[in-house]
Image (spheres, grey):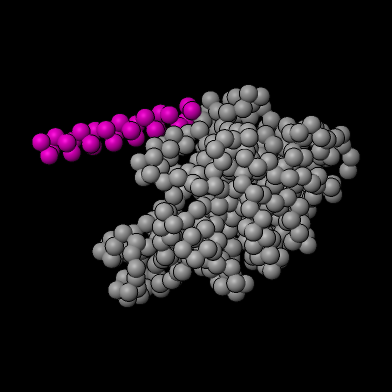
Amino acid sequence: MGGPVAGGARGAPIPVDRSVPGLIVKFGDYPLHHGGVGAIRSLGRLGVPMYAIAEDRCTPAAVSRYLRQAFVWPTAGTEEPERLVEGLLGIGRKIGRPTVLIPTDEEAAVLIAEHQDALAARFLFPCVDAKLPRRLASKQGLHELCAEHGIPSPTGVFPQSYEEIERFAERARFPVVAKNREAFERRSRPAVNGTTRIADREGLLRLARGWGERPGVVLQEYLPREDAEDWIVHAYFDTESTPLAMFTGVKVRSWPPHAGMTANAYIVDNPELADIAARFIKQIGFTGVIDLDLRFDRRDGQYKLLDFNPRMGAQFRLFENEAGIDVVRAMHLDLTGRPVPEGEQLAGRRYIVENIDLAALLAYRRSGYTTPHAPARASGTELAWFAGDDPLPFLTMLARFVRPGAKHLHQLWRARRSATAGRT
């Protein structure tokens, strides 16, 4: 397959194959996803034709100047796999040529891995053990793999009944953290909304009464933020589980605070952390893009693996090397048989998610928390939404974000006003 050479971020040519398009694959209703916009821009700026699955034609991704076509396909992520596979194949037929699949959520990554044979005729993607992505995305599966390969992770229990939770509550050291055991459930509602910090026994038992006969949660030790640092690893691994692009960074702020999506982060060199990630990937034999969240526990000096996303992370555009390579570009180059240019990561580079970082900044200032490894000054800044060469996704994000956000703030103001009046 031939194609012209496009220029990278540092002016050096990137031997991208423009004859092979990319398709952003996402299942579920979350139109304000900056990771998909970042992937569209990253490959689109190199001349790669880009396509995307979108909830409607007015999502930020759908209006990017670098998108060739948006396939409007509203999904909930709970559909039967066969229906989703058939829908993907239909999109592949419309594109009409081999296309690199770029999943942005666990549902998509797991579906692609578990239906490789059906999808391989029309799409390009890393060939991985079909069962591995689902196991890595599961809190219990990841915990078991960490124990098997000697990777530190927070101490956790996986209760099978309310009675087990009661027994755990009697001996647990609070606070504890509750997370959904599986990354996604096709036939049931999640037990908790993301990472939930539970302060005491009474709070745990009160929540647990709503989890049903078989609680789908993991209860983990809480790593105090004053004794911990949040780190990120993004990388792309080839068929031999060798890293062709490897990056490490520190998370400065997240939203919700200390437990949610990255709002502000920096590239920070951490050879020890890169070595831990590379050894673990080699041991489990993973191929493709990874997004890892780890917490450094100063009490015992260990990096503890919290989450393993077997796909690109929303903040992947933080990470780029001197040759202009990020993990999405590395994957496209490798899957099309092109060399992946090497280079040092751009240490000190900063990433900001505009619509959540201000709220996160205010929350972190109130708590007095600071990140020791954050550089005093950024060497460069990548914004999640705004780009001078592609402004419409930013404006669309504002239109969809500000109105519900203003309504929510108004509701909070009314509730606080009513509470104040009641006390008076």
Q: Is residue 213 visible?
A: yes
Q: Position of residue 304 (x, y in %)?
A: 53, 62
Q: Position of residue 125 (x, y in %)?
A: 73, 52
| 20 up-or-down from 118: above or below | above
- Chain part drawn in magenta: 398-424
In the image, what residue occupies the spot 23% across and 37% down? Answer: 415
Q: Position of residue 247 (x, y in %)?
A: 66, 49
Image quarter in which the C terminus is found: top left
Q: Is residue 172 placed above or below 255 in the rendered structure?
A: below
| Residue 215 or residue 291, whichever sits in front | 291
| Image location of residue 219, percent across then percent down | 41, 66
Q: Looking at the magenta stretch, what is its main secondary structure? A: helix
- Please identify the residue farthest to the right as the structure is shown: 2
Q: Can residue 188 be seen at all in this image of the molecule?
A: no
Q: Residue at x 70, y 55 (%)?
A: 288
Q: Is residue 227 magenta?
A: no
Number of callouts: 0
Quadrant where the N terminus sits is top right
In this view, which residue lies farthest toward the left?
Answer: 424
> For this view, does 345 lie left or right of residue 153?
right
- Residue 388 position by quadrant: top right
